[in-house]
Amino acid sequence: MEQKIDVIITNTLSNLYDWDSENIREDFISFLNSEYAINKEKLAEIYDSYESLSPLTRDSVTFNLNDFVSKQLN
């Protein structure tokens, strides 16, 4: 079953803080690039944009992570 890139990135971001990592940014980029051949620069932009959001925004029930990722990809 082929998944859409935005869904893969969304799922990865939603579980990101469960990872045991010394450099979560680099691990996020490396994982998605090696597993799904997603452009490293685009992944860095998405990660940095996500991290720039306040934790209250990211954790809000009204925050739509899938929409956020979709907008970042376009």
Image (cartoon, grey):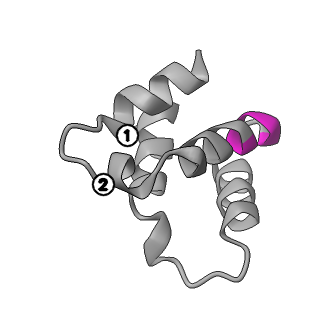
Residue indicated by mark 1:
1
Give 59 or 45, whichever is nearer the viewer. Answer: 59
- Which quadrant holds the N terminus? top left
Position of 57 relative to 18 (above/below): above
In the rendered view, does 28 fall on the left or right side of 39? left
Which quarter of the picture shows residue 10? top left
Does the magenta portion include 41? yes
Please report the bounds of the magenta region as a residue range: 40-44
On the question of residue 72 being in view, the answer is: yes
Q: Earlier in the sequence, mark 1 or mark 2?
A: 1
Q: Which amino acid does label 2 sit on?
A: Asp
Q: What residue type is labelled 1?
A: Met
Residue indicated by mark 2:
59
Which quarter of the picture shows residue 66? top left
Q: Pointer 2: residues within 10 angstroms few (<14), some, or many (20+)?
A: few
Residue 69 is situated, as x and y percent measured from the top left of the image, at 48, 32
Residue 38 is situated, as x and y percent measured from the top left of the image, at 70, 38
Give 30 or 18, whichever is nearer the viewer. Answer: 18
Q: From mark 1 to mark 2, how far is it between C-alphas?
A: 29 Å
In the rendered view, does 64 fall on the left or right side of 40? left
Q: Pointer 1: residues within 10 angstroms few (<14), some, or many (20+)?
A: few
